[in-house]
Image (cartoon, rainbow, N blue to C red):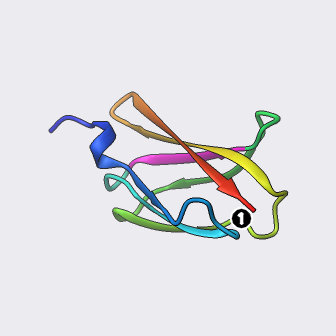
Amino acid sequence: PSFSNNDINVYPNPTSGEFTIFAPEHSSIKIINCLGRIVHQVKAPSHKIIVDLSNKSKGLYLIIVIKNNKSITRRILVY
């Protein structure tokens, strides 16, 4: 099966810190801050991943989901 934008959901967005990512199982997920640094990285054991960035700086982050050498990017705002 192909991997498309419809396979990735992130909520709530914006968030105060904790949010859920729905992505294909066994995908790699990287969260990158505005300076380009990886602040969180995980290999998704299931399709639902809960992430907490409440201890990180407020601002815009990129969520990069990688599966089968294809990547899809989402943005999330932490306030």
The residue nearer to you, when weighing 42 against 76, is: 76
Q: Which residues are magenta?
A: 27-32
Image: 51 above or below 34:
below
User: Where's the N terminus, which quadrant?
Assistant: top left
Three-letter code for the amino acid on which mark 1 is drawn:
Leu
User: Where's the C terminus, which quadrant?
Assistant: bottom right
- The part of the image, by quadrant, that contains residue 46 is bottom left
Q: In the rendering, at what x and y percent does residue 5 appear?
A: 33, 38
Circle 1 Cα neighbour tier, 10 Å, few/some/many (<14 / 14–19 / ≥20): some
Residue at the disc numbered 1 = 53
In the image, what residue occupies the spot 36% across and 52% down?
Answer: 26
In the image, what residue occupies the spot 71% across and 46% down?
Answer: 60
- Left or right of residue 1, residue 15 in this image: right
Image: 50 above or below 38:
below
The residue nearer to you, when weighing 74 against 2, is: 74
In the image, what residue occupies the spot 52% across and 66% down?
Answer: 12
Residue 17: say if magenta. no
Image: 60 above or below 36:
below
In the image, what residue occupies the spot 63% across and 66% down?
Answer: 15
- The part of the image, by quadrant, that contains residue 40 is bottom right
Predominant SS of the magenta segment? strand
Residue 31: say if magenta. yes
Q: In the rendering, at what x and y percent does residue 28 appear?
A: 47, 46
Q: Return the residue found at the far top.
A: 69
- The part of the image, by quadrant, that contains residue 62 is top right
Q: What is the secondary structure assignment of the residue under circle 1?
A: loop
Q: Return the residue found at the far left.
A: 1
Q: In the rendering, at what x and y percent does residue 69 appear?
A: 38, 28
The residue nearer to you, when weighing 10 against 71, is: 10
